[in-house]
Amino acid sequence: MDARLLEILACPICKGTLVYRREAAVLVCRLDRLAYPIRDGVPVMLEEEARQLGADDPLLER
Amino acid sequence: MRSHDQTVHGQFDPQAEAYRHSAVHAAGPDLDYARTLVAGNAARPEQALDLGSGAGHLSFALAPHVGHLVALDPAPNMLAAVVRGAQERGLRGIEVQAGSAHSLPYRDGTFSLVCTRYSAHHWVRLEDALREAARVLTPGGHALIIDVIAPDSALADTHLQAVELLRDISHVRNRSVREWRELLGAAGLLETHYRQWPLRIEFASWVGRMRTPQTHVAAIRSLQASAPREVREALVIEADGSFMLQTGLFWLTKPPHPASGPRRPASAPP
């Protein structure tokens, strides 16, 4: 995941900052508790493709 | 029951290769003019975004004239076609991302150029998409919008929308120039240039590209056969069903100062 791309990407719903979780290949929006998948290196920034995270999901940890 | 987004996906994802090789999409005077406008811009756009990139023909035309370009499309096979096409052409600086035009996954003021070609007539939330395009543009940045333009005549317009829907069930609407101007003005984008070109649609390849079912092809032919003179003349319908569309190109600017930003229609509440 290119650092420059991470800089321009935002959550498509709240436009907030995303956190890159390399080990899970996802971009996480903490506010909406959504994990957007990165498939074959392509960020999939579609709400219907994102995984809803539980409040205690480790992907939300700081 | 499928949503509109799923219908678009179902229509286009399997057809990515057909679009990659489509002559109608790979070339055109609008593409040449778009290239001239972007290359002739005083400041080279550093970050550009192609909305609903499809197989990437607009991205390929503009990539040599911008710093970096992001091709955004909801269909993964289309994005794969963009990657292959960029490699074949030796183009660097093109990234692909999956997303929807009406909910852009970017921060405010990210791009100095936002462009789109032959995609907006599939957008079910065009107003939201144009507002989003304006949001992600830098102040003073440019928008380039190319799409099929609906005829001014309501009669010809209704015929066109009917045959477009029969051909492709994910079709939403072609807008007239007047409708486009209202929508673009409401999004806070200022028009600098507008140009229009005739685009001849060869019937067999037009329905072939979309795998239009035979029952729908027959319905289109039936509508064409019974179309009144005004419609035949406006759309220049030929014996084999081929006809003429109009491609429109808008070149717009996001005002550099927020004070001259989005306008609301007079009837809307403040």
Image (cartoon, coloured by chain):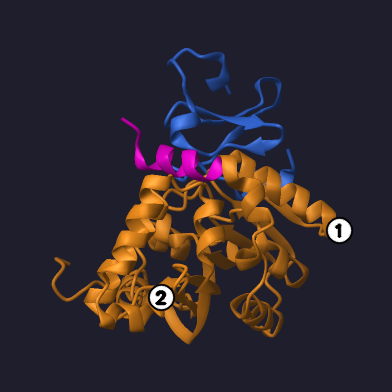
Chain colours: A blue, B orange
Asked whether, in this view, residue A22 is left or right of residue B207, the answer is: right
Q: Quadrant of residue B88?
A: bottom right
Asked which secondary structure carries label 2, the reply is: loop
Where residue B235 sits: x, y (%)?
A: 38, 78
Q: Which residues are magenta?
A: B1-13
Per the picture, the main secondary structure of the magenta-coloured stretch is helix
Q: Residues within 10 Å of mark 2 (few under 14, many from 20)?
A: many
Could you tell which of marks 1 and 2 lies nearer the N-terminus?
1
At horizontal 72% and vertical 63% (from top left) the residue drawn is B60
Where residue B201 sits: x, y (%)?
A: 51, 70
Asked whether, in this view, residue A32 is left or right of residue A9, the answer is: left
Where residue B222 sits: x, y (%)?
A: 31, 60
- Residue B42 forms part of the magenta stretch: no
- Residue B7 forms part of the magenta stretch: yes
Question: Considering depth in this image, is A36 or B193 the residue closer to the camera?
Answer: B193
Asked whether, in this view, residue B69 is left or right of residue A55, the answer is: right
Give the quarter of the figure containing the N terminus of chain A. top right
Asked whether, in this view, residue B78 is left or right of residue B104, the answer is: right
Where residue B5 sits: x, y (%)?
A: 41, 41
Q: CA distance from mark 1 to mark 2?
A: 40 Å
Question: Considering depth in this image, is B83 or B240 the residue closer to the camera?
Answer: B240
| Above or below for B146 versus B168 | below
Asked which secondary structure carries label 1, the reply is: loop
Subunit that carries the residue with mark 1:
B
Q: Which residue is mark 1?
A: B90
- Inspect this view and state whether residue B75 appears: no
Subunit that carries the residue with mark 2:
B
Q: Amino acid at mark 1?
A: Gly
Q: Which residue is mark 2?
A: B237
| Above or below for B232 versus B99 | below
